[in-house]
Amino acid sequence: MTRFICVQCGSQFGETEAPPPSCPICQDERQYVRWSGQEWTTHEALKKTHANVFTDEDGVTGIGIEPTFAIGQRALLVPSDGGFVLWDCVALVTDETVRRIEKAGGLRAIAISHPHYYTAMVTWSEAFGGVPIHLHADDRQWVMHPNNAIRFWSGDTQAIGPGLTLIRSGGHFEGSTLLHDANGAAGHGALYAGDNLQVCQDRRYVSFMRSYPNYIPLNEKAVRHIADAVAPFPFARLYGAFAHRNVREDGKEAVARSVERYLAAIRS
């Protein structure tokens, strides 16, 4: 039995004898099937051709894959009491990566922004003794690899550690989630957003989409909901989905001006 991985989005599926007939995540309008058709790999095969890479993301450690694989996002190690929280996930975790994280303090939990970044979350959890995986219940249907480590939460917020709060922003997915770290950015607060708030190239603004590859924008109601969801939380820094795509200062102000710029654009 094999855990097959979708080459296009990086989602790892539960154990089967043959590859699944398709990837529901890629068939959804927010993603897409490769022009050459559905293609599968495995974690074992990926380890032979790819490696994890570590980056300094303005004081937080990022973990990616080289050569780039699937969507190309990075995961982040958020400091917490009793070990790190892995924010978002990538499709590869090597023995060297496990040793490096264990030496730095270990992993105590995983939390993920939305289904495009679930990837090999179960394999990551197992590599660290079955740590819990926090997912919003509104996105339960997109879990391709069910496992007892998954903890579905509901409602608008969920505390997962001292100063660490999951926030349901909605928008990109129904259960799209942000992570607020009250102790981040030297006590000024940090927001981990994935691409629920996509950091723009100038790193002064963020943007909002239902689908990035298919250019489907969010409507005003959805964007206003995101703005309202983050309003109670102070944060100076915002961490996006991709390496070095971070709003480094005045993060909350950057979100506010981005909301107004976006809404002005879709109204015109």
Image (tube, rainbow, N blue to C red):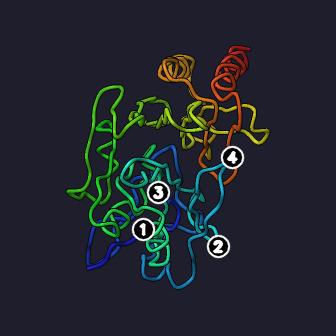
Q: Which mark is residue 245?
A: 4
Q: Is residue 162 left or right of residue 266?
A: left
Q: Which mark is residue 67?
A: 2
Instruction: Using the image, determine if residue 61 lies above or below residue 182.
Output: below
Q: Earlier in the sequence, mark 4 or mark 2?
A: 2
Q: Are marks 1 and 4 in contact (CB under 8 Å)?
A: no
Q: Can you give x and y, in whole percent of width and height, for residue 5 in the image?
A: 42, 69
Relative depth, front residue between 174 and 29: 174
Q: Amino acid at mark 2?
A: Pro
Q: Is residue 131 left or right of residue 42?
A: left
Which of labels 2 and 1 is toward the front? 1
Q: Amino acid at mark 3?
A: Cys
Residue neighbourhood size for the residue with mark 1, other residues' Cα within 10 Å, grouped as few (<14), some (14–19), many (≥20): some
The residues tagged by marks 1 and 4 sit, at their Cα atoms, a distance apart of 26 Å
Residue that mark 3 sits on = 89
Q: Earlier in the sequence, mark 1 or mark 3?
A: 3
Q: Quadrant of the N terminus?
A: bottom left
Q: Residue lying furthest bottom in this view?
A: 48
The residues tagged by marks 1 and 3 sit, at their Cα atoms, a distance apart of 17 Å
The residues tagged by marks 2 and 1 sit, at their Cα atoms, a distance apart of 24 Å
Residue neighbourhood size for the residue with mark 3, other residues' Cα within 10 Å, grouped as few (<14), some (14–19), many (≥20): many
Helix, strand or loop for disc 1: helix
Which of labels 1 and 3 is toward the front? 1
The residues tagged by marks 4 and 3 sit, at their Cα atoms, a distance apart of 16 Å
In percent of the image, x 61 and y 69: which residue is there?
Answer: 53
Q: Amino acid at mark 4?
A: Arg
Which of labels 3 and 2 is toward the front? 3
